[in-house]
Every structure is written in structure tokens, then in C-alpha cells.
Amino acid sequence: MATSKSAKIQAEIEKVKAKISEQQARLKELEQKKLEAENTEIVDIVRGLSISLDELPVLLQAIRSGAPLGQSVPKDTDPDDKEDTEE
């Protein structure tokens, strides 16, 4: 008995669906691996900062708010404090 044209097409559809399912599972696995790698990178960066756990939330909040980071050094704006080299 000859296989009908529609049966052949249906068999091909099933093969494609199986491949799609496999690729979706692979995609999900790769996305999870990427997330894990990003988390590891973040942990390494934070550990490299050598700050305490109590300071971490403060630092993150400062970053979110756009506050300048680093030490704040006031500028000397008093012209009388400068040495006068032209006398």
C-alpha cells in the first residue's frame, strides 16, 4: 500500500516538531548557563571591591541614584591661599 502524500507531509511535520522541541530545550539550557556565568562574574567583581556586606547595599544605592563614586575632595577656591610667585 502506497503512503499518501499527506501522510508523508504529516511525518515530516512530526520530525520538524521534534527538532524544534529539542532546540527549545537546548536554548533554555544555554540561557541558564549564561545567567550562571553572569552571576559568577558579578560575584567576582563584588569580591574584588573589598567592601563589607554592610557597605554593599549603600554602594549599590549610590550607583542607582547616580551619585559620584570615589572619595570626595573639596577644591581649594580661596585665591589668598595660593602662593604668590610674582612679586
Image (cartoon, grey):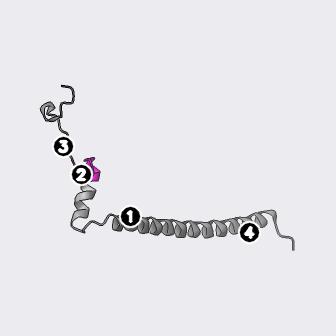
Percent x, y of residue 6: 77, 63
**SS for callout 2:** loop
Circles 2 and 3 in contact, beta carbons < 8 Å: no
Q: Nearer the viewer, residue 34 or 3?
A: 34
Residue 77 in which image quadrant: top left
Q: Which residue is mark 4?
A: 11
Q: Which residue is mark 2?
A: 71
Circles 1 and 3 in contact, beta carbons < 8 Å: no
Residue 81 higher or lower than 16, as above or below:
above
What amino acid is at disc 2?
A: Gln
What amino acid is at disc 3?
A: Pro
- Label 2 – label 1 distance at C-alpha: 20 Å
Q: Which residue is mark 1?
A: 45
* The residue positioned farthest toward the front in the image shown: 87
What amino acid is at disc 4?
A: Ala
Q: Residue at x 27, y 47 (%)?
A: 66
**Mark before the other along the chain sequence, 4 or 1:** 4
The verdict on residue 23 being magenta is: no
- In the figure, is residue 20 to the left or right of 85? right
Q: Which residue is mark 3?
A: 74
Specify start and end residues of the magenta stretch as a single range.
63-72
Q: Residue at x 28, y 57 (%)?
A: 60
**Mark before the other along the chain sequence, 3 or 4:** 4
**SS for callout 1:** helix
Q: Nearer the viewer, residue 34 or 12?
A: 34
- State which mark lies toward you, 3 or 4: 3
- Label 4 – label 1 distance at C-alpha: 51 Å
**Mark before the other along the chain sequence, 4 or 2:** 4
